[in-house]
Image (spheres, coloured by chain):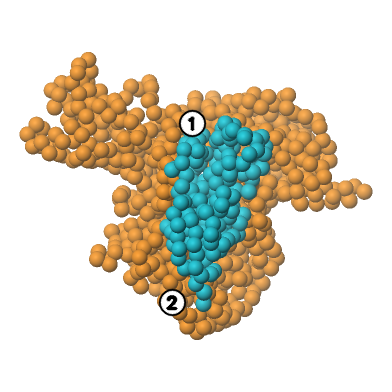
């Protein structure tokens, strides 16, 4: 039933060249084909944000994309975060502020905050709240996520 | 341990769970795969009430890589699920593993397809031809209770499957003419727990040993293991139920599900691993839902503001089945149970009906009964205050049960003991500077809710009335192995609460070791003889108590062994920071040294001191720890869009001894956020055709980061219960207080319109309609 399509993509710095079914979702590709299960699937209709990844530096919902749409792109998932100092710092701030409870939505929030960190704009707390409002968390009430985000983004250098 | 101080309990120890959850190494059930694993998908009913006329599987079976399709007849050896209770007048429902003929709710599973992957399984589902006969859906709760012909379960000949009356005092002794009556009909909407991780189950099979392992996104692995024996006849030593990392529960993962049994049954039958992961649509349709009550209530008070009587009728819509194992009694009965709240009211009457409808079963949801009860009583109190022109805080203080009046038994039979109702209320009032913040401005308001709850309950009180299940004890096994490493095992199942951290803080203090040197094992039925899981604000209180008992036992034994080795009396020995030391000397032993001597050195110790370092203790608090909080919210309503914005929010709460303040605050913040959802956003709306109008997260709204304000929290630690550890449960309180506080703040903000809301959630749409109708009627 499904056509196989060739896919060349770089995920967390590793190049992949393989064939996948045309209808395979990017979220399923990362989780099932590459075993990168840190990307979580919470709603599969683009609302909850748990599946957020970065494609060529910009956040995207992996549940709303097909795997083949990653062709020729550089993809980053949460598994890459512990390896680089600036993203490692985001993880540490989440620990220090108790910004996660069950941890299921967390990868999505980490991705958005990393994107804010790398943009060249300074954000107020309200703007941070707004930027994070597209991601749903059911455990924390957001307060401790906002606290961590404030601290992470307070020290950002604006070039 | 020095009795006056704790080294770890009370401290903000950062969570041990976080590293794996942050770096992508957490392992949720959907992350688990096995070679050769099959995937299942369910054909679900697209109507709420009907009958199956025929099912044609021919096309679906022809599809490549489809390994099997199962209907009711293929699984009929699994007897119907029946949730038992010894409550009088209770009519249990029979729930078949798949629809036999009758369909009772939208999304009820009819067929299971087993295939190579989920994509193919769903292809096959779309090829099944099914013919249904539609029956008139039973949706309206009150109509369902009065129905004489159309029943969810025709054999029961009624939709009211349980009725109970609570009564205390005699209102006939009171001169009703002198009393002021506040009488309203309240409605609490149906909602869904909506954990971010959808329900999921993977069953692995070891063909060599013929043992099964069910990985389940459950809060209650112990209950599931017991149910698998009951319904599938698989003994506990043939199956292990593991709750790995679980992405939130809030009650929605605390019941037994058909999909859970089916995954095990199919893995066992086909002798291959089987996986099912719910998509969000399935999760919205089929995970146990929360609340849904209509409550007719009347508060009578005298002119001075003394409460005289509280009368109510509670109509609880429990959906299509009495949920296993909690029963239909769970939610509606506790609305009545907690309706009186923290107030002295001599006369109490409540009639409760648990009513079936063509909606999914309701089950435990954060707060259980209390969010609706608090909404009702606290609204009545504020309405009364407006009527007699008294400050709402003063009216509460006039009627609140004080410390010197406890223990105090309220009309439903619940006993309040060692609860700081008055103190929490006063603390919250001062936190928010109540008299200053009270405003006469239009569209702005402040609301108070104060409540009592029962947590960490023991064996004398079951979580749901009459339920034949021991939820009142918790066992802990503490082991020190041959390398000197320490582990403590529990029957609880953490799903975001950070129990791996908090329980290690408790063990650390009482054993004399650092929390990070202890491995906490939980959520695995093969490690403990009996356990249920994590629900009902029980885990810190009960497992914490077991942890203290077992740690003390272990410590005492270690002191005996060390006393022999060091040749000094045990009173001369201390254990701190993982070192066993002789006071005022340099003599010391590490745990690895002690273990080597106990397990491997055959000469130093007498045989009786060479027994394995395994200790086991159970803890049952018999009753429970009653507790309280006061929430105060301020709101501002946009008069054009009718959006309700929460400006300030304070919580003063009494959770006994705080184990980890950071985690406790996180539970309060998250609880309040869900309460905000219940008050302002969340409702599962079934229309008269039985169709769900909120079947996506674009329609079923939960609070986001713009909707939840910063919450100011204060803990009272001076009302300690009589249990070991002095811990009270606190996981649900945030949700319990928010409904009443927000409803009252909204009513205060509408004071210029003389409008009082009586329904939650109060959405902009409902508020608009209420205001327009009022204007129309006045014109």
| B685 displayed left or right of B552 | right
Q: Residue B182 location, x and y as percent? A: 74, 41
Residue closer to the observer: B608 or B182: B608
Tell me which residue sits at (27%, 67%) in the image: B207
Residue B131 in picture, x, y percent from top left:
59, 80
Q: Residue B33, relative to residue B611: is it above or below? A: below
Report whether B761 appears left or right of B259: right
Extreme residue in the left direction: B603
Q: Residues within 10 Å of mark 2 (few under 14, many from 20)?
A: some
Could you classify mark 1 by the number of other residues whose Cα lies within 10 Å: few (under 14), some (14-19), or many (20 or more)? some
Q: Which mark is residue B65?
A: 2
Identified at 38% across, 37% down, the residue is B503
Give SS at disc 1. Answer: helix
On screen, residue B722 versus residue B578, left or right, reads right
Image label count: 2
Residue B158 vs A149, above or below: the answer is below
Q: CA distance from mark 1 to mark 2?
A: 53 Å
* The N terminus of chain B - image quarter: top left
**Chain identifier of the residue bearing label 1 in the image:** B
Looking at the image, the residue that sits furthest to the top is B584
* Chain B as rendered: colour: orange
* Residue A47 visible here: yes
Q: Which mark is residue B210?
A: none
Decide: marks 1, 2 in contact (CB < 8 A)? Answer: no
Residue for badge 1: B661
Establish whether labels 1 and 2 are both on one chain: yes
Rendered hue of chain A is cyan
Residue drawn at (63%, 32%), measured in percent from left and top?
A: B650
- Residue B371 is situated, as x and y percent measured from the top left of the image, at 60, 44
Disc number lying in front (1 or 2): 2
Q: Relative to B328, does residue A140 appear above or below in the rendering?
A: above
Task: Choose between A53 and B186: the one closer to the eye.
Answer: A53
């Amino acid at each position: 039933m499904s056509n196989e399509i060739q896919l060349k993509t770089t995920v967390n710095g590793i190049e992949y060249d393989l064939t996948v079914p045309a209808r395979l979702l990017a979220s399923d590709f990362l989780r099932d084909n590459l075993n990168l299960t840190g990307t979580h699937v919470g709603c599969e209709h683009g609302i909850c944000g748990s599946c957020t990844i970065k494609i060529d530096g910009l956040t995207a919902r992996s549940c709303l994309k097909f795997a083949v749409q990653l062709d020729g792109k550089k993809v980053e998932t949460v598994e890459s975060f512990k390896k680089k100092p600036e993203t490692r710092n985001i993880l540490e701030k989440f620990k220090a502020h108790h910004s996660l409870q069950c941890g299921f939505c967390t990868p999505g929030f980490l991705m958005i905050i990393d994107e804010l960190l790398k943009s060249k704009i300074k954000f107020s707390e309200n703007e941070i709240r707004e930027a994070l409002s597209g991601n749903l968390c059911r455990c924390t009430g957001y307060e401790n996520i906002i606290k961590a985000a404030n601290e992470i983004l307070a020290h950002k250098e604006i070039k | 341990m020095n009795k006056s101080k704790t080294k770890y309990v009370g401290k903000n120890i950062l969570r041990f769970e976080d590293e794996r959850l942050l770096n992508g190494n957490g392992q949720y059930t959907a992350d688990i795969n096995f070679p050769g694993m099959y995937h299942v998908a369910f054909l679900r009913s697209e109507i709420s009430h009907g009958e199956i006329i025929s099912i044609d599987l021919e096309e679906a079976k022809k599809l490549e890589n489809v390994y099997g399709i199962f209907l009711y007849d293929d699984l009929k050896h699994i007897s119907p699920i029946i949730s038992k209770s010894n409550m009088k007048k209770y009519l249990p429902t029979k729930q078949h593993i798949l629809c036999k003929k009758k369909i009772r709710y939208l999304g009820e599973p009819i067929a299971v397809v087993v295939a190579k992957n989920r994509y193919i399984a769903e292809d096959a589902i779309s090829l099944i031809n099914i013919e249904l006969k539609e029956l008139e859906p039973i949706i309206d709760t009150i109509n369902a209770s009065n129905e004489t012909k159309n029943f969810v379960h025709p054999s029961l000949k009624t939709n009211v499957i349980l009725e109970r009356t609570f009564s205390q005092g005699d209102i006939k002794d009171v001169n009703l003419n002198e009393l002021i009556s506040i009488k309203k009909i309240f409605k609490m909407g149906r909602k869904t727990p909506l954990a971010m991780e959808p329900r999921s189950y993977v069953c692995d099979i070891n063909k060599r040993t013929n043992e099964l392992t069910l990985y389940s996104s459950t809060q209650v692995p112990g209950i599931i293991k017991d149910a698998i024996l009951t319904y599938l006849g698989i003994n506990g030593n043939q199956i292990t139920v593991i709750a790995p990392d679980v992405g939130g529960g809030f009650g929605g993962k605390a019941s037994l599900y058909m999909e859970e049994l089916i995954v095990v049954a199919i893995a066992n039958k086909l002798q291959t691993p089987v996986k099912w992961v719910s998509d969000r649509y399935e999760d919205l349709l089929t995970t146990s839902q929360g609340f849904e009550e209509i409550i007719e209530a009347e508060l009578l008070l005298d002119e001075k503001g003394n409460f005289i009587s509280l009368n109510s009728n509670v109509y609880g819509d429990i959906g299509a089945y009495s949920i296993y194992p909690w029963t239909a009694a769970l939610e509606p009965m506790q609305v009545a149970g907690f309706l009186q709240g923290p107030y002295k009211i001599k006369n109490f009457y409540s009639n409760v009906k648990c009513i079936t409808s063509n909606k999914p079963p309701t089950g435990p949801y954060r707060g259980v009964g209390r969010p609706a009860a608090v909404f009702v009583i606290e609204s009545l109190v504020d309405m009364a205050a407006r009527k007699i022109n008294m400050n709402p805080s003063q009216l509460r203080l006039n009627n609140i049960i004080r410390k010197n009046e406890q223990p105090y038994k309220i009309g439903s039979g619940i006993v309040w003991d060692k609860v700081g109702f008055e103190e929490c209320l006063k603390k919250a009032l001062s936190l928010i500077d109540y008299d200053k913040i009270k405003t006469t401005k239009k569209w702005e308001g402040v609301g108070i809710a104060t409540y009592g709850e029962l947590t960490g309950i023991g064996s004398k009180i079951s979580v749901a009335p009459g339920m034949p299940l021991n939820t009142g004890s918790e066992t802990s096994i503490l082991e020190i192995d041959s390398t000197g490493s320490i582990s403590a095992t529990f029957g609880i199942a953490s799903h975001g609460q950070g129990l791996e951290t908090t329980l290690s803080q408790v063990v650390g203090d009482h054993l004399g070791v650092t929390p990070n040197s202890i491995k906490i094992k939980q959520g695995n039925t093969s490690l403990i003889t009996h356990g249920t899981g994590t629900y009902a604000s029980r885990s810190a209180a009960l497992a914490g108590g077991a942890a203290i008992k077992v740690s003390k036992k272990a410590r005492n034994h270690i002191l005996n062994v060390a006393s022999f080795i060091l040749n000094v009396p045990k009173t001369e020995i201390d254990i701190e920071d993982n070192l066993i030391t002789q006071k005022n000397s340099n003599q010391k032993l590490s745990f690895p040294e002690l273990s080597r001597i106990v397990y491997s050195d055959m000469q130093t110790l007498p045989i009786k001191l060479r027994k394995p370092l395994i200790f086991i203790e159970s803890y049952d608090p018999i009753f429970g720890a009653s507790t309280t909080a006061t929430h105060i919210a301020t709101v501002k309503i946009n008069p054009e869009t009718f959006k309700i914005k929460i400006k300030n929010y304070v919580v003063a709460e009494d959770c006994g001894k705080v184990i980890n303040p950071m985690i406790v605050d996180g539970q309060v913040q998250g609880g309040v956020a869900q309460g905000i959802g219940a008050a302002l956003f969340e409702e599962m709306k079934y229309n008269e055709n039985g169709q769900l109008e909120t079947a996506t997260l674009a329609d079923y709204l939960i609070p986001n980061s713009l909707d939840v304000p910063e919450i100011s929290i204060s803990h009272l630690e001076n009302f300690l219960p009589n249990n070991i550890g002095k811990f009270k449960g606190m996981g649900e309180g945030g949700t319990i207080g928010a409904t009443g506080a927000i409803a009252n703040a909204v009513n205060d903000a509408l004071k210029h319109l003389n409008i009082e809301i009586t329904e939650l959630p109060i959405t902009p749409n409902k508020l608009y309609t209420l205001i327009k109708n009022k204007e129309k009627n006045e014109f």
